[in-house]
């Protein structure tokens, strides 16, 4: 990788940290036993598995017996939603979610609608916040699950999950939260936040891809998605992906230690980035809130410019960004999140997401703004839309 490249797409995925990688390496060589085996090789692997589970539990205030390893954030979301829907169909078939969830949640809900479940998609305000009162009003006698994300991957909005959780707890309805973007970027306590199920994914906090976890509070009724052996307390079958699970454990430990320092560092960089963009580039606007926002998330509208054109131009100069969400690149549909906060199609198309990690530096931020400024000027000078407006 060239030294000069600048990676500002950490909401899509992050670099595996050297510390995480070295924790994983022994699991590719001498620790190769199957954790279910009774012999010493198996016991060594089982011990690594237990340590990783403990690290995940500690990071979110859960018990070790409430952590189940999965194949990533999408699997955790699907399991929480479809698993509770199946296990609680006798009580009801109504689910509440928001309009700005990740596709892993939205499409899992859509799949259930095809099976005869009904889903309420709550609107959000201009900054992407769900109103807890709306959740309260939407709960019906047949509601079995509320699933609202902890923090949004496109515009960084941190949702009032503690209040939403309280409402659900009082109503006797399960509350699941997609915390994939939140882990390592804010304090999480599943007990204090009244959370019944929580999804997380290692590759969003400098761990490996294809591994995640679902926290399931003891006592929650949930069906299996993957049947087979007795792994994961008979709830998620399949020989454990030990190297990745060990990587997840190390990554979450690193991501949550000194978290306040990291939050302060990233927020300062992000604020500098946003301030410089809106002050130095005319007709730009911040998407998402100024308060209760993920420390590493910046998202801006750049009027009269196509986000995709902007991305290509930045990429040519070694800067990696995103025009919304990774899932929407390649399609012409504007982001459902930007539409839900009230942007029109044209403005949504001109938006740019820059997502930071603690590995980014102030020099990188300054260089990015300089490059962005020049690129916007260039693209606007070629834009018929812009010339017409002027
Ligand atoms: C990345 C992401 C997911 C999906 O996680 P994978 O591990 O990539 O399957 C789900 N929800 C949110 C909010 C995400 O950012």
Image: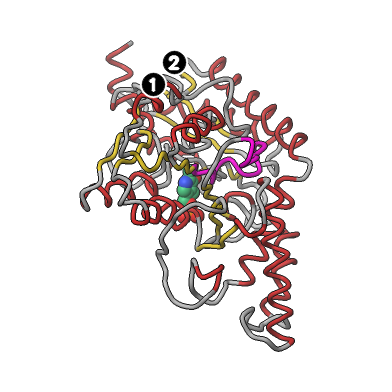
Q: Position of residue 309 (x, y in %)?
A: 38, 37
Residue, disc 1: 303
Label 1 crowding class (10 Å Cα cut-off): few <14, some 14-19, many 20+? many
Residue, disc 2: 283
- Nearest the viewer among 91 and 56 is 91
Is there any visible trace of residue 24 in the rendered image? yes
Disc 1 element: loop
Circle on res. 51? none
Q: Residue drawn at (30%, 23%), measured in percent from left and top? A: 344
CB atoms of marks 1 and 2 within 8 Å: yes
Q: Position of residue 274 (x, y in %)?
A: 58, 23
- Which segment is the magenta one? 177-192
Position of 266 with respect to 158 (left or right) is right
Q: Position of residue 387 (x, y in %)?
A: 31, 17
Q: What is the chief secondary structure element of the magenta stretch?
A: loop
Residue 271, above or below 50: above
């Amino acid at each position: 990788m060239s030294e000069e490249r600048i990676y500002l797409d950490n909401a899509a995925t992050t670099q595996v940290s050297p510390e995480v990688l070295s924790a994983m390496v022994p699991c590719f060589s001498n620790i190769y036993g199957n954790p279910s085996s009774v012999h010493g090789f198996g016991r060594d692997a089982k011990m690594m598995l237990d340590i990783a589970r403990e690290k995940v539990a500690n990071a979110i205030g859960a018990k070790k017996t409430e952590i189940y390893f999965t194949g990533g954030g999408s699997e955790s979301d699907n399991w929480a939603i479809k698993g509770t829907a199946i296990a609680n169909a006798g009580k009801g078939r109504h689910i509440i979610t928001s309009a700005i969830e990740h596709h892993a949640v939205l499409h899992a809900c859509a799949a259930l609608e095809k099976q005869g479940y009904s889903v309420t998609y709550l609107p959000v305000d201009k900054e992407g916040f769900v109103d807890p009162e709306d959740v309260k009003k939407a709960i019906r006698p047949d509601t079995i699950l509320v699933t609202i994300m902890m923090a949004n991957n496109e515009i960084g909005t941190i949702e009032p999950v503690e209040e939403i959780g309280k409402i659900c707890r009082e109503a006797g309805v399960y509350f699941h939260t997609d915390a994939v973007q939140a882990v390592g970027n804010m304090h999480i306590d599943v007990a204090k936040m009244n959370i019944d199920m929580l999804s997380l994914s290692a590759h969003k906090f400098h761990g490996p891809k294809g591994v995640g976890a679902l926290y399931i509070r003891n006592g929650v009724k949930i069906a299996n998605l993957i049947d087979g052996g007795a792994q994961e307390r008979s709830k998620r079958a399949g020989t454990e992906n030990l190297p990745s699970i060990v990587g997840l454990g190390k990554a979450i430990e690193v991501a949550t230690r000194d978290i306040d320092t990291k939050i302060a560092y990233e927020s300062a960089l992000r604020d500098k980035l946003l301030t410089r963009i809106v002050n130095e580039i005319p007709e730009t606007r911040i998407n998402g809130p100024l308060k209760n926002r993920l420390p590493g998330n910046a998202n801006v509208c750049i009027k009269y410019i196509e986000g995709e054109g902007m991305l290509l131009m930045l990429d040519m100069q070694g800067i990696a960004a995103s025009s919304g969400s990774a899932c929407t690149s390649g399609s012409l549909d504007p982001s459902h999140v930007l539409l839900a906060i009230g942007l029109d199609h044209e403005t949504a198309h001109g938006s740019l997401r820059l997502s930071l990690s603690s590995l980014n530096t102030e020099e990188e931020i300054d260089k990015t703004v300089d490059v962005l400024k020049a690129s916007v000027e260039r693209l606007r000078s070629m834009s018929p839309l812009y010339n017409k407006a002027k």
